[in-house]
């Protein structure tokens, strides 16, 4: 049973560029959430997708956007990269229940470095 | 605002000794609480959760946590620490009424042989 998979594992970009990160949820899950984890910090919620729509959004600018596909996989896009966007980007999947009492399952993340 | 606090940046403990990693929370409504562990260059692994019921929750790898409503705490415990338990421990609360998780800043556990 495959867990949450993310690609790529590492990425180096320069300021002003754009990046796309990818995530495949755990088998049987239909909801994908994205988190940003800066060095030495806990993860910060970016947004959540369910039924191919953004359902919730954290305090992140519009430069951060996403997409969910019919097979439940998801992409995170970041435009006009800033040095401060350097972080580990984590994808988490879960089963949408409207109750939130089930744990989210996390991938190993994509380490994004901005030069 | 709903939040989680982990007051200790690092906890050091000798192998075989009991360990405690502290977490306090602030949430409107009933709290849904979670503990995750993160090893270097890896994602988060779920350890245990409190939704309702017994205040003592048992989880993976011998960890347990005690929910205390009056002190708004959810401390993680293990009776006998292993060197392999050394990692970053993250406490999280679900932000009511959404499914968004709010994390603490994490506590780095170092277990010495």
Image: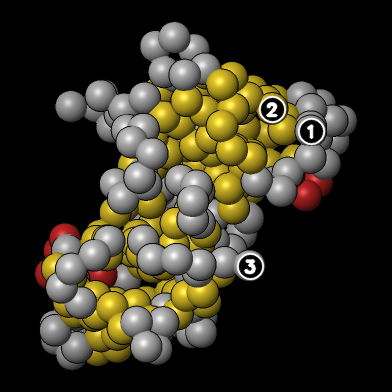
Position of B48 with respect to B44 (left or right) is left
Q: Chain of mark 3?
A: B
**What residue is pinned by disc 1?**
A62
Looking at the picture, do discs 1 and 3 lie on one chain? no
Disc 2 + disc 3, Cβ < 8 Å: no
Q: Residues within 10 Å of mark 1 (few under 14, many from 20)?
A: few
Q: Residues within 10 Å of mark 2 (few under 14, many from 20)?
A: some
Pointer 2: what residue? A65
Q: Do callouts 2 and 1 mark residues in contact (Cβ within 8 Å)?
A: yes
Callout 1: chain: A
- Alpha-carbon neighbours of circle 3 within 10 Å: few (<14), some, or many (≥20)? few
Q: Residue furthest top?
A: A70
Q: What secondary structure is found at the residue carrying circle 1?
A: loop
| Image x and y of residue B73, in percent | 38, 82
Which residue is labeled 3 in the image? B1
The quarter of the rendered structure image containing the N terminus of chain B is bottom right
**Mark pair 2, 3: CA separation:** 25 Å
The residue at the point 41 percent across, 18 percent down is A72
């Amino acid at each position: 049973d495959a867990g949450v998979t993310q690609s790529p594992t590492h990425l180096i970009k320069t300021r002003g560029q754009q990046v796309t990160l990818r995530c495949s949820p755990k088998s049987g899950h239909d909801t994908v959430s994205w988190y940003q984890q800066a060095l030495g910090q806990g993860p910060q919620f970016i947004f959540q997708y369910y039924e191919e729509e953004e359902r919730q959004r954290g305090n992140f600018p519009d430069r951060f956007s996403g997409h969910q596909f019919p097979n439940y996989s998801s992409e995170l896009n970041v435009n006009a990269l800033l040095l401060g966007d350097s972080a580990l980007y984590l994808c988490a999947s879960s089963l949408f229940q409207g109750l939130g009492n089930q744990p989210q399952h996390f991938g190993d993340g994509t380490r994004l470095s901005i030069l | 605002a709903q939040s989680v606090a982990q007051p200790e940046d690092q906890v050091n403990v000798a192998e075989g000794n009991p360990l405690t990693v502290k977490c306090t929370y602030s949430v409107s409504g009933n709290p849904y609480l979670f503990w995750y562990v993160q090893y270097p260059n890896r994602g988060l692994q779920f350890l245990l959760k409190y939704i309702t019921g017994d205040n003592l929750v048992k989880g993976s790898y011998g960890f347990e946590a005690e929910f205390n409503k009056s002190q708004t705490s959810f401390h993680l415990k293990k009776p006998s620490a292993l060197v392999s338990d050394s990692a970053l421990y993250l406490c999280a609360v679900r932000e009511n009424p959404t499914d968004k998780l709010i994390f603490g800043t994490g506590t780095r556990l170092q277990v010495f042989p």
